[in-house]
Image (cartoon, rainbow, N blue to C red):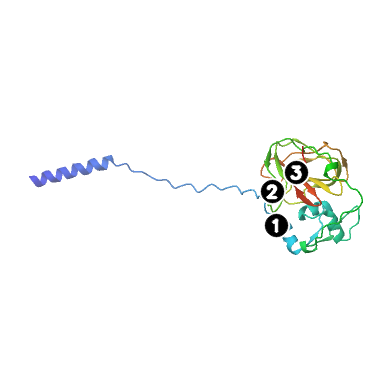
Amino acid sequence: MKKNLYLIICFCTLILVSGCTKIHKHSAKDPYPEKKPRKERVYFTYGMKSKKASASGDTYIVKKGDTLYSISLLYDVNYIKIAKWNNIKSPYRVSIGDQIIIKSNKYRKKITKSKKKIKFASNIKWVRPHNGRVSKEFSYSDVGKKGIDISGNIGDKIYSSSGGIVVYAGNGIKGYGNLVIIKHNDTFLTAYAHTNKILVEEDSVVEKGEVIAELGDTDSIKPLLHFQIRKNGKSVDPEKYLP
């Protein structure tokens, strides 16, 4: 009798436990969604070309759209030095296929100052190319581009920081997008990168404060103006010159 009672209790307990247990059916997990390829950020990488050339030199083959000024920007070398190394006379024209020798630091002697008076910073009146917030300040430690980034909206007007001649207008330099370079005198150049639309042509004369382009995001991860001032081929902090 006791044995039968024990069996009945065990059977009831088993039914009770099985009734309270939920059976979970796990459906097959969806495969991970395919990720869009990450946009390449060349911002901090392409400067290695300039760094390598400064150590061991390089030979650059001129492509369509290149000018001596864009090549000098690429290598962080004064265009006058490059012209001298390659026997290129003023007005410093280059042709597609030309081999441009870039010498290493060993051969980059400082240019001796001429006795003739030339314009320097004190004689140039600067204006800001855009009045947006500076989102990236100048740094001498950057391997590549050395300038400032100014935030803005696509289509904003970009102004020439001073009067001069447009010596480059194109998109042939990796990492700069649509780029404008203006020569102000034998000492100073300015560069305006990542523009959405270029509004000036090469060899055109521009006035201080003239609209030269529209702000954009070409070859950039967001809309901005990357602005440089080059003094004798080397980048200097724009904030020391701009009002």
Q: Give the image location of residue 239, x and y in percent.
A: 74, 41
Mark positioned earlier in the residue sequence (1 or 2): 1
Quadrant of residue 208 in the image? top right
Residue 217 seen by the camera? no
Quadrant of residue 155 in the image? top right
> Which quarter of the rendering shows the C terminus?
top right
Residue at image coords 69%, 48%: 139
Q: How crowded is mark 2: few (under 14 residues within 10 Å), some or many (20 or more)?
A: some
**For the residue labelled by badge 2, is the local secondary structure a helix, a strand or a loop?**
loop
Residue contact at pointers 3 and 1, CB within 8 angstroms:
no
Mark positioned earlier in the residue sequence (3 or 1): 1
Number of callouts:
3
Q: What residue type is labelled 2?
A: Ser
For mark 3, what is the residue?
238
Residue 48 numbered mark, or none? 1
**For the residue labelled by badge 1, is the local secondary structure a helix, a strand or a loop?**
helix
> Foreground mark, 1 or 2?
2
Q: Distance between the residues labelled 3 and 1?
A: 23 Å
Residue contact at pointers 1 and 2, CB within 8 angstroms:
no
Residue at image coords 22%, 44%: 14
Q: Give the image location of residue 202, x and y in percent.
A: 86, 45
> Foreground mark, 3 or 1?
3
Q: 13 and 138: which one is in front?
A: 138
Q: Which amino acid does label 3 sit on?
A: Pro
For mark 2, what is the residue?
139
Residue at the extreme left = 1
Q: 147 and 58: which one is in front?
A: 147
Quadrant of residue 198 in the image? top right
Residue 30 numbered mark, or none? none
Mark positioned earlier in the residue sequence (3 or 2): 2
**For the residue labelled by badge 3, is the local secondary structure a helix, a strand or a loop?**
helix
